[in-house]
Image (cartoon, grey):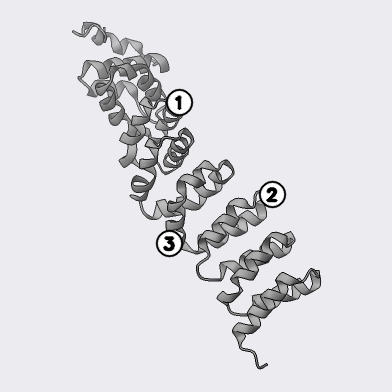
């Protein structure tokens, strides 16, 4: 009774770390969970976590989540809890509750996190909340990674951007059609149809810069949902864009091919 609340919590946390008795560990955790958060317990809790059983580890992560700071430490736990999806979800839940405090830590370690294959899916789901809240965040944080020297980093940034489908960054995605790595180019082609009708004009404009992309752009146009390629063909006058759209129509097929007959009078040999 003579000890302050802070000292009691610190003493209990140290006891938790020192004992190997399951019942005593359970009692210590119950007491700490009943107390208001005490920062002095952080060191003992972090040291106890690797040796605890799964039940106690989940409770310990919960206790750590109540403390201020420790975002980097909890993020590290989140990444290293490979053997237990349940504990990873608990760490993820703690991180999500920290809101904007998590974002600077995530951003500062993003390249490192993307380099760890086991962390990518969960880091993506954790970060998407921030990107939806701040539509320009993907442009500031992910778009620069599309030019990263490591192929895996470029790929993961692309995959995250494809989940967000922000029309403002289409130009950057189109730039990956010239990526030095075939798998990055292929992934960009695979994702571009997600932008739907928003991708049509940027694709045709990008084609005008580089005719060599005609076949790829035609293939992407075929996959764009809810687009009438013939109606789009009627709107364009540039011969290269006409050629591209006619090529796409040829790939996709149309019920009334006779509608293309007027283009037999085209002055452009390629359109003809």
- In the image, residue 239 above or below residue 6: above
Residue 92: x, y in percent?
57, 57
Circle 3 SS class: helix
Residue 114 to residue 242: above or below: below
The residue located at (47%, 39%) in the rendering is 156
Label pair 3/1, CB-CB below 8 angstroms:
no
Instruction: Identify the mark nearer the N-term, 2 or 1.
Output: 2
Within 10 Å of disc 2 (Cα), the crowding (few <14, some 14-19, many 20+) is few
Q: Position of residue 47 (x, y in %)?
A: 65, 65
Q: What is the C-alpha distance between the residues marked 2 and 1?
A: 32 Å
Residue lying at 55% horizontally and 43% vertically, measured from the top left: 116
> What crowding class fits label 3: few (fewer than 14 Cα within 10 Å), some (14-19), or many (20 or more)?
few
> Is residue 100 shown above or below 245?
below
Q: What residue is at 61 percent from the left and 86 percent from the top? A: 5
Q: Which residue is mark 3?
A: 100
Q: Does dot 2 land on a helix, a strand or a loop?
A: loop
Q: CA distance from mark 2 to mark 3?
A: 28 Å
Image position, residue 198 (x, y; %): 32, 35
In this figure, which residue is indicated by the disc labeled 2? 83
Q: Residue under circle 1?
A: 186
227 over 165 or under it: above or below? above
Give the side of residue 93 with respect to residue 144, left or right.
Answer: right
């Amino acid at each position: 009774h003579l000890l302050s609340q802070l000292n009691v919590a610190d003493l209990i946390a140290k006891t938790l770390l020192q004992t190997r008795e399951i019942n005593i560990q359970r009692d210590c955790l119950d007491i700490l969970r009943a107390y208001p958060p005490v920062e002095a317990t952080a060191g003992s809790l972090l040291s106890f976590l690797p040796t605890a059983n799964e039940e106690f580890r989940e409770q310990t992560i919960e206790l750590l989540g109540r403390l201020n700071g420790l975002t980097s430490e909890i993020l590290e736990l989140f990444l290293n809890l490979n053997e237990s999806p349940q504990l990873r979800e608990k760490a993820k839940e703690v991180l999500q509750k920290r809101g904007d405090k998590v974002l600077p830590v995530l951003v500062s370690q993003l390249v490192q996190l993307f380099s760890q294959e086991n962390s990518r899916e969960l880091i993506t789901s954790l970060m998407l909340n921030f990107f939806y809240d701040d539509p320009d965040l993907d442009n500031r944080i992910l778009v620069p990674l599309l030019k990263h020297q490591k192929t895996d980093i470029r790929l993961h940034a692309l995959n995250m951007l494809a989940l967000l489908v922000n029309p403002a960054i289409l130009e950057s995605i189109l730039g990956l059609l010239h990526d030095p790595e075939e798998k990055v180019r292929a992934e960009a082609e695979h994702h571009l149809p997600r932008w739907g009708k928003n991708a049509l004009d940027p694709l045709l404009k990008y084609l005008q810069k580089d005719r060599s992309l005609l076949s790829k752009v035609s293939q992407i146009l075929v996959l764009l949902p809810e687009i009438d390629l013939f109606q789009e063909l009627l709107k364009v006058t540039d011969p290269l864009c006409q050629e591209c759209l006619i090529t796409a129509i040829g790939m996709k097929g149309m019920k009334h091919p006779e509608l293309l007959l007027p283009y037999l009078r085209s002055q452009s040999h390629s359109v003809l």
